[in-house]
Image (cartoon, rainbow, N blue to C red):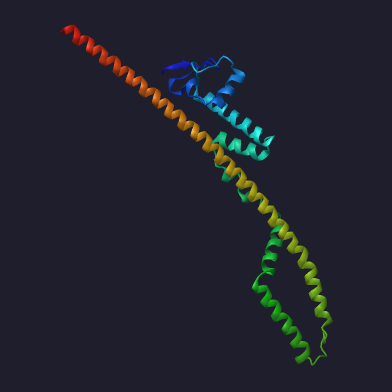
Amino acid sequence: MQVFTSDLSKKDFPVKEKVSGKMIREGIMREIKKEYPDFDNNCYLSSSELNHYRDQYIQNLLTKEMGTITDLEKTVMESIHHDSLLADEVSELKNPGTRGQRWADKIASFGGSWTFISIFVVFIIGWMLLNVVWLTNKGFDPYPFILLNLILSCLAALQAPVIMMSQNRQEEKDRERARNDYMINLKSELEIRMLHEKIDHLIMTQQENLLQIQQIQVDMIRELTEKMDKHR
């Protein structure tokens, strides 16, 4: 297997990983020159070394734009580095909530449904009919239904904090979704930037290869022309 020596690490790498300094973008070249000032367009490095400085360039870019890299940006960078799906990292299944929070969600969901309203209306009407009509207003809770008012007051006092717990839980979910959307959008933007750079690299590589092929063809044509001139 053919190898070449990198001008950065002085290590040997396969020739297929060889990258010319002419094909490196200006921003990444500045990152390389911070550690290797003598590196220029006539030098060579491996694609793995280039990827390292690409990551470093992105980190510095994030730091410049946002001041400091937060845990969210670090998660995005690790996802890009390990080539993993960010959707798996931000799945809500990793934080299902406590048992009390889940019960609060269920109670709030039922308390805000037409099923609860219908059952409650039937219960109140039945309570009134039972005491006024069936028990001729001499039952356990005659008009003005003091016991019913007490039950309704207790129910409202308990239902309000449960609904607030559910709302707080929903706000946490919304904040988590916002963080997840931010990380996914940030990763998409960074990967698009890297994709543009890789496409530029491929185009420049192809252009260089085409120029070399053309030069070889020109040399072959020149040799053939010289041979033909000699035979004349």
Residue appearing at x 50%, y 22% in the figure: 46
Horizontal placement of 190 versus 170: left or right? Answer: left
Residue 210 position, x and y percent, is: 36, 24
Looking at the image, is 90 positioned above or below residue 116? above
Residue 107 position, x and y percent, is: 70, 65
Looking at the image, is 123 positioned above or below residue 205? below
Horizontal placement of 183 versus 160: left or right? Answer: left
Looking at the image, is 18 positioned above or below residue 182? above
Who is closer to the viewer here, 228 or 17? 228
Residue 159 position, x and y percent, is: 76, 67
Looking at the image, is 179 positioned above or below residue 8? below
Name the image quarter holding the N terminus: top left
Residue appearing at x 49%, y 35% in the figure: 195
- Asked whether residue 20 appears in the rendered view, the answer is no
Who is closer to the viewer here, 23 or 151? 23
Residue appearing at x 22%, y 12% in the figure: 225
Who is closer to the viewer here, 118 or 47? 47
Residue most extreme to the left: 232
Residue 134 position, x and y percent, is: 75, 91
Who is closer to the viewer here, 191 or 13? 191
Name the image quarter holding the C terminus: top left
Q: Quadrant of residue 168?
A: bottom right
Q: How many marks?
A: 0
Residue most extreme to the top: 230
- Asked whether residue 213 appears in the rendered view, the answer is yes
